Image (tube, grey):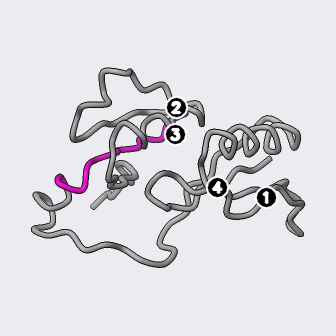
Amino acid sequence: MAVNLKRIGIFVKDMKKALAFYRMLGLAIPESADEENHVEVEHNGLRLAVATRESAQVVYGSWEEPSGYRIELAFQCDSREAVDELYRQLTEQGHIGHRGPFDGFWGERYAIVQDPDGNLISLAA
């Protein structure tokens, strides 16, 4: 039996705000998707699904507000300077910075920002 990872999915409170955030990270998502309950986008061979919390209720039968760190979505930037610049742009747009740019002991330039739903999104180079 072959099993393959199909997609990574996240549930969001406000689709329009969430999609605007992920567009800033380079995902090509049409503006018309802002009013949808479920959106999928492929980027560099990965598929990301963004769905409303109402969709979660349909799929899982309920919705409980999550807490704690559950997953990491990491976005690769072209350079160390690009990490700093993207972090600056995101926080200037009102997104909450969780950890400003730093040089990780593992050799990457790293920063962490919250998406509109509080998920921690890593920026790396």
- Image quarter of the N terminus: bottom left
According to the picture, the residue beneath numbered tag 2 turns out to be 23
* First in sequence: mark 4 vs mark 2: 2
Quarter of the image where one finds residue 42: top left
Looking at the rendering, the stretch of residues picked out in magenta corresponds to 44-55
* First in sequence: mark 1 vs mark 4: 1
Q: Please state the total of marks drawn on the protein image.
A: 4
According to the picture, the residue beneath numbered tag 3 turns out to be 21
10 Å neighbourhood of mark 4: few (<14), some, or many (≥20)?
A: many
Q: Is residue 70 left or right of residue 107?
A: left
The amino acid sitting under disc 3 is Phe
Disc 4 on helix, strand or loop? strand
* First in sequence: mark 4 vs mark 3: 3
According to the picture, the residue beneath numbered tag 1 turns out to be 100
Asked if labels 4 and 1 touch by Cβ distance under 8 angstroms, the answer is: no
- Towards the viewer: 40 or 65: 65
Question: At which x and y percent is residue 15?
Answer: 33, 41
Asked if labels 2 and 3 touch by Cβ distance under 8 angstroms, the answer is: yes
Question: At which x and y percent is residue 66?
Answer: 36, 74
Residue 113 circle label: 4
Q: Is residue 93 left or right of residue 8?
A: right
Task: In the rendered view, tell whether residue 33 sits above or below residue 11.
Answer: above
Disc 2 on helix, strand or loop? helix
Q: Is residue 46 left or right of residue 123?
A: left
Disc 1 on helix, strand or loop? strand
Q: Give the alpha-carbon distance from disc 4 to disc 2, as whole Å.
A: 15 Å
